[in-house]
Amino acid sequence: MVKSKLASNDPSATQPTAGSEPDTAAMHITLNPSATSPATGNRKPLTSPSKPTAVFTEHSSNGGGGSGSNNNNNSSNNSKPIGKGGGGDDGGGSAKSPSRRKNSDEENDVIGDLIGDYGKWQFVMTFLLSLFQVPNTFHIYSPTFQAADKSFWCRRPTHLNNVTIDRWRNVSSSQENCRMLNYDWSTLTSAQVSMENFSLPKNLTDTVACSAWEFNPYDKLGNTWSSEWDLVCDKEYLKNVAEMFFLAGVATGGITSGVLSDKFGRKMMLFISAVLQSIFGLALYFADSFEFYLVLRALLGIVSVSVTYAGLILAIEYVDGKWRTIAGMYNLFPLPVSYIMISGIAYLTQDYRNLQLCIGLPGVFLCLLWFVLPESPRWLLCKGRIAEVKDVVRKAAAFNNRPLPDNLDKLLKPPVDEEETAAGVCELFRSKYLRLVTFCFLCVWFSMNLIYYGLVLNMNSFGGNIYLNSALAGLVEIPAIALAMYIINRTGKKWLFCATFFAAALACLCAAIVEGKPEFLVMKITFVMIGKFTISAGNTIMPVYTAELYPTAIRNVGVGACNLAAGFALVLTPYLSMLTKIEDHLLMTLLTAWCIFGGVVIIFLPETMQHHEHEERDEEKEIDTQLTV
């Protein structure tokens, strides 16, 4: 944790500690309380000649778009931090006393005072950033179509290619797909095999494993991994390995991307990752061996998650106040839209290579946004790059039609770093409260990712039309995210989050009951979509809720640990589809169990919005003291 103070002429000025920011590398600056009239509590203009004092807190994270709970400081001079409450289009709004704030989303800093909490500039920038989620979603979801199961059978010998497929499968007894009768087929002709009364000796029962296969050309799946590299029978598990490589890359990138983003900047990390994502994504189109394909998928996973995290952090640092939570959740909207888009693209291409080309190209055009998107002004201020901060602030303020004060140079003083003490993993278990929160969230993040991606990445295991199922899965997530955004600040997060797990459990249980019954296929798909709707709402709430329960000083470490648990779940999800080959009901039954488990664990967590504000402030002060002494 880094604390920096700007010079002040008021030695008695109270220096409130940053409360609890969103789970990003956001930098919060509280101006000198002397800029506020003690008598009236009204804000003096930013052009006040008094020099500002700021407490500067930097923290970074690998995920989440949430905000922490409020940190109300009761100073002896009744000082109040300068800031604007949730602004309108121009980021305006009345100043709010800390004692009246129920959520630290309404924390404000000098950047927010200058350019507004949320205005036209922030809307355009966050919208452009959200577009980076489109290729990310494409790449993580593409195996649903690229690795789809195709019907297959043992390949006909070349000289028997004129024999119909049905006739060949009957004569060769290759109905089991992986084995055929052990016979010297070179002694037969197409005419002989095609005769209706032709059959092999009845005492011929010895079979041999097929060495090559043919795949159904009329299943509307086109060329897939299976047909390209014969990933069937004893090689079928390699399809899951390919997806596991990608998700292992996601887990690895999730651990490192936050640190690199803090060091090199959000914009730099975003665009380096986006360029590499485009290169690896397009290189997959030309991959001529499965081994090379695996390596590229792993590298693609590493850079894709870096695009996600850097873009999310940048989006949240563009805004201020209550808009931080909304910006983090707003960044998720392209996900369901991308599910729908890739379903249509896959249906039109019906070839895994052509699909890969189509989903790799959008990233190339997004790289051009380098000339439009600025670096985070809060990160630049943290690094003391004042000239660049001024440039961003002037452009943003002009776009938002906000006048800048004459003393801009005084307001944007570079912070002075004190000796930095990094929070370690051990801090997550220092107190009873932190041990409880950490253990619960490790379980919840593991469960959520296993359930969410267990549904998303196994759409081809649920029966029905894979393209329609995938489009519906994206369609139901749009209102789920919108609903979560609407009510998340109007009610407690704990019970809403808990309800999403239990509702998903009920839907998955109903789907498990009707599993394996073709006459109930539509009903099963309906239950699966209900489960997808509810768990998507929970997936939107999870990072926000996690951010609120961890004190600022160790939030980065806490969410990093949660991401590690999520990474383990991601690596397991490709293998869930194999459960249906063991027993029809096993997959949905397992997802039901994890839904119930996650919901029960959430019951033990506190409700931050109503019950935990004072406890968290005390906890944060304790941790902050231990780390800075």
Image (cartoon, rainbow, N blue to C red):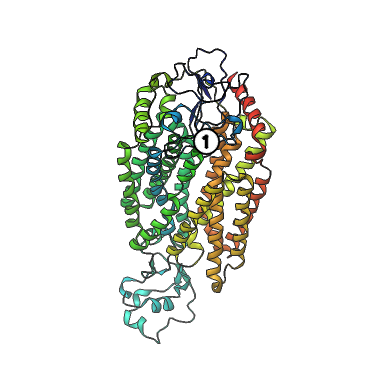
The answer to whether one can see residue 12 in this image is yes
The quadrant where residue 605 appears: top right
- Residue type indicated by callout 1: Pro
**How many marks are shown on the rendered structure?**
1
Residue 453, how many percent across, how many down?
A: 51, 52
Residue 217, how many percent across, how many down?
A: 36, 69
| Residue at position x 36%, y 41% in the image | 274
Residue 385, how many percent across, how many down?
A: 38, 23
The answer to whether one can see residue 64 in this image is no
At mark 1, the secondary structure is: loop
Quarter of the image that includes the C terminus? top right
Give the residue at the far front of this rendering.
40
102 relative position to 301: left or right: right
Give the residue at the far bottom of this rendering.
197
Question: In the rendered image of this protein, does residue 70 appear above or below residue 387?
Answer: below
628 relative position to 204: left or right: right
Q: Nearer the viewer, residue 617 or 160?
A: 617
Residue underneath mark 1:
22
Q: Nearer the viewer, residue 613 or 434?
A: 613
Q: Nearer the viewer, residue 95 or 387?
A: 95
Question: In the rendered image of this protein, does residue 180 appear above or below residue 341?
Answer: below
Residue 472, how many percent across, how many down?
A: 47, 61
Question: In the rendered image of this protein, does residue 30 appear above or below residue 258?
Answer: above
